[in-house]
Amino acid sequence: MITLPARLAVFISGGGSNLQALIDASKRGELAARIVWVVSSSSSAYGLERAAMEGIETFVFEPKAYPTRELAEQDLLTRLSERHIDFIALAGYLKMVPNTVVRAYRGRMVNIHPALLPRYGGKGMYGHFVHEAVIASGDMESGPTVHLVDEVYDNGRILEQARVPVYPCDTVDTLAARVLAEEHKLYPRVLDNLIRGRYDKQTD
Ligand code: GRF
């Protein structure tokens, strides 16, 4: 049984605009969670500064800094459990989450992807590559997908998507900005629904 507000960890690798959207939604009372921990794969991610400005504890997780992969995974799991983390939101996290963590958080870990899955997903489909692929396909719409995380990239059950038009004059930058604006609305809403148990319990 999880008591609300849930304790949320957000994993990032870069700018952290989605992290900011989650922080803001939580402050407005639109997300039944408190962001208590931010984990970054990179020590130079701007999202770490956003977290620090909000007084949120941060951690840079670098598996290579540990003697073995197993010890790195174990340390991450221990830190999650010490902080009683209920849910994990991946927000631009560019590394694979260790399988042990995926298993421990099955149904309680989500990711946001900047295109409509399942079509534009999988290894290598991140950042500008995703929007390039959408433009090259001639598709007339795109939009973010929020999905549960399983052991395979961009593969878990889709919870919700939002749609935006793709215009003939779009560049990667104009399309990315249109999708990102939707991400900031979609992600807090879907997380709130998940935390409140509004999706059925099937996890994949
Ligand atoms: C977003 O486009 C998200 O969909 C993808 O990575 C990007 C992260 O952006 N997974 P930000 O760091 O939240 O600004």
Image (cartoon, grey):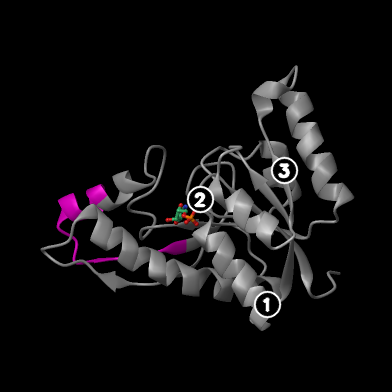
Residue 51 percent coordinates (x, y): 66, 56
Q: CA distance from mark 2 to mark 3?
A: 15 Å
Residue carrying label 2: 92
Tag count? 3
For image coordinates 64% across by 68% down, the residue present is 23
Instruction: Tell me which numbered mark, 3 or 1, is placed earlier along the sequence.
Output: 1
Amino acid type at image mark 2: Gly
Relative to 48, does residue 140 appear above or below in the rendering?
A: below
Q: Nearer the viewer, mark 2 or mark 1?
A: 1
Q: On the rendered image, what quadrant is the N terminus found in?
A: bottom right
Instruction: Tell me which numbered mark, 2 or 1, is placed earlier along the sequence.
Output: 1
Camera-side residue: 9 or 153? 9
Q: Are marks 2 and 1 in contact (CB under 8 Å)?
A: no
Q: What is the span of residues highlighted in magenta in the rendered image? A: 132-145
Amino acid type at image mark 3: Phe
Instruction: Tell me which numbered mark, 2 or 3, is placed earlier along the sequence.
Output: 3
Q: Secondary structure at mark 3?
A: strand
The reply to whether the residue tagged 2 has its Cβ within 8 angstroms of ligand 1 is: yes
Taking the image as shown, residue 153 lies to the left or right of residue 143, namely right
